[in-house]
Amino acid sequence: MIAHGNRIKIFTGRSNVPFAESVCTELGIELGKCKVDSFADGEANILIEDSVRGSDVYIIQSTCNRVNDNLMELLVMIDACRRSSAGRINAVIPYFGYARQDRTAKGREPISAKLVANLITVAGADRVLTLDLHSGQLQGFFDIPVDHLVGSPIFAKYYLSKFDEKTYDHDDFCVVSPDIGSVARSRAFATKVHMPLAIVDKRRQRANMSEVKNVIGDVRGKTCILFDDIVDTGGSLCHAAEALIEVGGATKVYACASHGVLSNNACDLIENSCIEELMLLNTIPLPSLYTGRKIRQLDAAPMFAKAITRIFNEQPLSDLL
């Protein structure tokens, strides 16, 4: 809980209001009053109803589905707070959209992640707080401080409780990286849960389309935990799970990822797959019509609340990582 709460203000756009409310509950303060609407032609219409003069302002907004609308809401809210003489403006972005467009893979492609970083900085943000960027080097795209949280401690706590070492032999389990690019992230998680590591050799033919070529590591007869940062259409994750069983000889496959984008028919694909359970963080709300049983969420709000408390009190965040 934050003392002298009159010096801190937390606002949110429309991307994930329950998450912002949960963060405020953890902090013991009320969510700031803010009118977030759209004009008839779709333009963002923002009115900050609480005074922010001299306050430490935190704007919680994931740039998830309705990505461009949510991004514009964030930018306009930052601008509104800057013009209202806020002391410091912190953009809290649990899920940072455009993060996968972080390099030029083909000729004449944009680096959209850098563009979005520039927009947030120019709008007037003094700091960014986010979780599990698609690649860590995105922090260097910003000319302002970036506090980069990781979701692996939340997942580690969950799986160490679910598969506690007194009951289960962790040599019979294996953490699996879904591609070569996620090896470092998966290795750190495997260390936390005291399990060996395997890798799925995946070839991406084009956006949202991949093919599994091989399984690197011994997963035969083991229960596997696929560990990723983003689940978008679900195709890559389901193909990897299928390969672990059919090619690698695994017995069961669980999966977890920080951000559940869940585009198109991803939920149906996962429900009909061999994946036993998919655990996500609540950085992005589940689709309102989802009624399945396999996809569940863990709460990342307490971690963000602790981070905000430390930032507000000028304390280090290293113990959260």
Image (cartoon, helix red, strand yellow):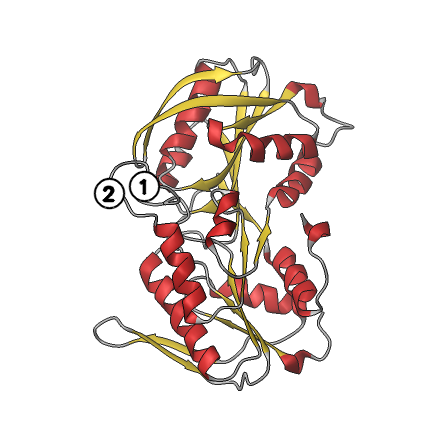
What residue is shown at x 53% (from left), y 55% (from top)?
Answer: 130
Horizontally, is 76 left or right of 138 in the view?
left
Disc marking residue 280: none
Residue 158 sits in quarter = top right
* Residue carrying label 1: 265
Badge 1 amino acid:
Asn
Q: Would residue 65 be found to the left or right of residue 23 on screen? A: left
Q: Assign a secondary structure to mark 2.
A: loop
* Drawn side of residue 177 relative to residue 29, left or right: left
SS assignment at label 1:
loop
10 Å crowding of disc 1: few (<14), some (14-19), many (20+):
few
Number of marks: 2
Q: Residue at x 44, y 52 (%)?
A: 286
The residue depicted at 64 percent of the width and 75 percent of the height is 29
Q: Position of residue 242 (x, y in %)?
A: 42, 22
**Residue 108: numbered disc:** 2
User: Counting residues from the N terminus, which is met first, the one under dot 2 or under dot 1?
Assistant: 2
Q: Which one is in front, 233 or 145? A: 145
**Could you say where residue 264 lies in the image, as x and y percent from the top left?**
30, 44
Tell me the CA gap for discs 2 and 1: 30 Å
The spot of residue 243 in percent (x, y) is: 43, 19
